[in-house]
Image (cartoon, rainbow, N blue to C red):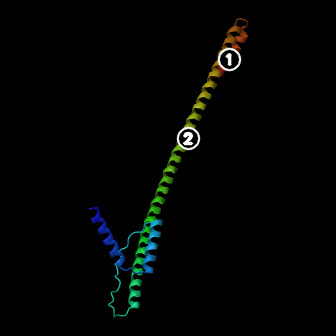
Amino acid sequence: MGKEETAEVEEEEEEEQAVPTQHDPDLEADIAMDETTEEEKPRPRLAVPQLSAPKLSEGDKVDFDDIYRKRMEKDLGELEGLIAAHFEQRKREEEELVALKERIEKRRAERAEEVRVRNERQKERLARQAEERARKEGEDTRRRAEDEAKKRRALCDVSSHFAGYLTKACRRKVEGGRR
């Protein structure tokens, strides 16, 4: 079997050598350009009809105008496809940009609402603190006044042993302070 496989491979090589290849510089340039663009960025495949090379019998003349026209039609089709792909990509990017702007505006509005709520809470907290301070100061003032009154009564009680006149004066002061 090894000899049969070798014989088949040799026959295929002979057939390849027997068929002359045509050198088409435009085709090679297209292939090279396709390879470089595919490496850089994948392009969408375009629906361009394949144009076949004109078949010539041996005696016919070559119609270069026809070849040029077909080549131009092919190039025009590719160009239109590229333009359509570009505008589709641009449309998608614009939609993404609009969506991004909407998300930014939504986030700004949420943030403004959060700041507003936080400021309201801060004001309420400060108001409660001020009320608490005022209440404590009022209680302290009342307590001090009561302490002073107790001290005066105590002094009046002590002085009552010493003189009746001082007792009456102290009572008047204490009663006058209460009113």
- Amino acid on which the number 2 mark rests in the picture: Gln
Q: Position of residue 117 (x, y in %)?
A: 51, 45
Q: Which residue is mark 1?
A: 172
Give the image quarter of residue 60: bottom left
Residue 122's disc number: 2
Near-viewer residue (169 or 8): 8
Residue sitting at 53 percent across and 41 percent down?
Answer: 121
Image quadrant occupied by the C terminus: top right
Tag 1: residue type?
A: Arg
Looking at the picture, tell me which residue is in the foreground, 165 or 112: 112
Whether 126 is drawn above or below 70: the answer is: above
The answer to whether 119 is drawn above or below residue 78 in the figure is above
Q: Nearer the viewer, residue 163 or 96?
A: 96
User: Viewer-nearest of labels 2 and 1?
Assistant: 2
Residue 80, x across and y down, in percent: 41, 77
Q: Nearer the viewer, residue 36 or 155?
A: 36
User: Measuring 51% from the left and 53% from the top, which residue is drawn there?
Assistant: 108
